[in-house]
Image: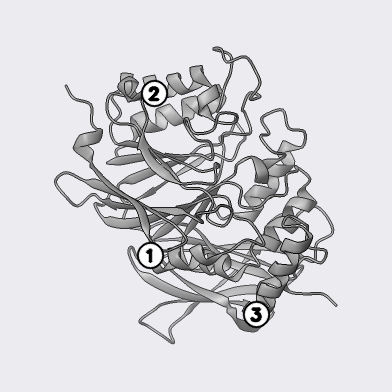
Amino acid sequence: MSIDYCNFSRGRNAILMALAITASATAVAQDPPATCGPMVGHATETSAIIWMYAPKDSTVEIAVEEDFNSGKALVYAFDSVAEPAGDLRGVPYTVTLSKLKPLTNYKYRVIINGKSDAAHGGTFRTAPSAGQASKFRLAVTSCMKFGQPQKSWELLLGDKPDLHVTLGDTQYSDTTNPTIQWKHHLRYRSVPEFSAVLRSTPNYAMWDDHDYGPNNSDGSAAGKENSLAGWNQFWGNPASGTVGTPGAFFKFSWGDVEFFMVDGRYHRSPDNAPDDDKKRMLGDAQFNWLINGLKNSKAKFKVIASGSTLADSKNDGWRIYTFARHRLFDAIGKNKISGVVYLSGDIHRSRVWTHPESDRVGYPFIEVISSGVANSKTLSYATVDFDTTKSDPSIQVRIIHGDGEAHADKTWKLSDLTHKE
């Protein structure tokens, strides 16, 4: 008998998760579900990507309406994307909703072959107009693990974020084999608490080692092109890479805050390479893309987001890439790029701090580490509240543990993160 994990009742999911812990927390589901989702992806002030996994050759539609205007839904048809590799029962479908209104709440339901299921519905709020001053809340996570306690997802939803950025280890397949990766992705999204976040908040994702390839993997990983193809099918991110440079990196804006999601795996030199001026974290083409983007950005705050920490990982982060780290800091300082903040994950604990080499940047260089939302002792995540409506815009960072308490709460003004003449 096949099991549709994504639509299983909460009680049965709890039983399945308990069995998974006993056997193996990373075992691959033997019978992937026929349906999974939906998920809200990249959202702008007038559009939103919705993702759904459904049986092959299905007719998949979505009915969308403003949440106060019941009964006047618009219906859009999904398109299937390239069929994933391997023996799977379904394929991913995506649709880009258009002609939406800025800062507006919408509700939706996905219809598969003429049938609608309550589990296939959700809500989202569109972004502010491009460049508009606004107040919004960002949730930051990494290190999701099937079979571990998931209560922090419910806490996160209670914080009512406007968007969610997840920074790697969204599943632990530890391979570039696309069939195994897909089965892990589908299994992890079967967790009700996780899927509730995906259904109700615009989501942006960057991979790290465990969902890119083996542990601590780098640009030499065989089959990395398969990982990239599958990753782009499985998330509703904006288009990634550039014409001449493949990779999972991309950028997007939310009002007058710009996010640069950088790929620290596809072009990365091996961790054990000599720590000299030939060792790269991002590769030269992606690094230039990042710096040019930061230099040309008109946003109040510019957020760099990656799975790799700046200093906290002694074996697999920017700490052992001295030239690459200094080149990044020096480029920000030399070009007097103000308002840059760094987000990371990976290390199964969370904190917010100022890097000791901030003098190279020219102002306190803040790193927000959010890791272990469902794979740590603390079950922690971070929220970042942006307020660019003030004369001196600000960010407030909170680190929330699974006990529901804020274990850090710090605020910086834009003037704090600006080069002094």
The residue that label 3 is drawn on is 11
Separation (CA) of disc 2 from disc 1: 32 Å
In this picture the colour scheme is one colour
Residue type beneath disc 3: Gly
Sequence-earlier tag: 2 or 1: 1
Callout 2–callout 1 Cβ contact below 8 Å: no
Instruction: Give residue 248's quadrant in the image.
Output: top right
The residue that label 2 is drawn on is 329
Residue type beneath disc 2: Phe
For this rendering, which residue is in front, 141 or 280?
A: 141
Residue type beneath disc 1: Asp
Quarter holding the C terminus is: top left
Report crowding for label 3: few under 14, some 14 to 19, many 20 or more residues within 10 A (C-alpha). few
Q: Position of residue 95 (x, y in %)?
A: 57, 63
The residue that label 1 is drawn on is 159
Sequence-earlier tag: 3 or 1: 3
Secondary structure under the numbered disc 1 in the rendered image: loop
The residue at the point 66 percent across, 21 percent down is 272
Instruction: Residue 314: tell me if it is visible.
Output: yes
Q: Which mark is residue 416?
A: none
The residue at the point 82 percent across, 75 percent down is 2
User: Where is 400 relative to 221, above or below?
Assistant: below
Instruction: Give residue 360's quadrant in the image.
Output: top left
For this rendering, which residue is in front, 125 or 165?
A: 165
Q: Position of residue 93 (x, y in %)?
A: 65, 63
Q: Position of residue 149 (x, y in %)?
A: 58, 63
Instruction: Residue 83: tell me if it is visible.
Output: no
- Foreground label between 3 and 1: 3
Question: Given the current orientation, which residue lies at the most extreme bottom position?
Answer: 71
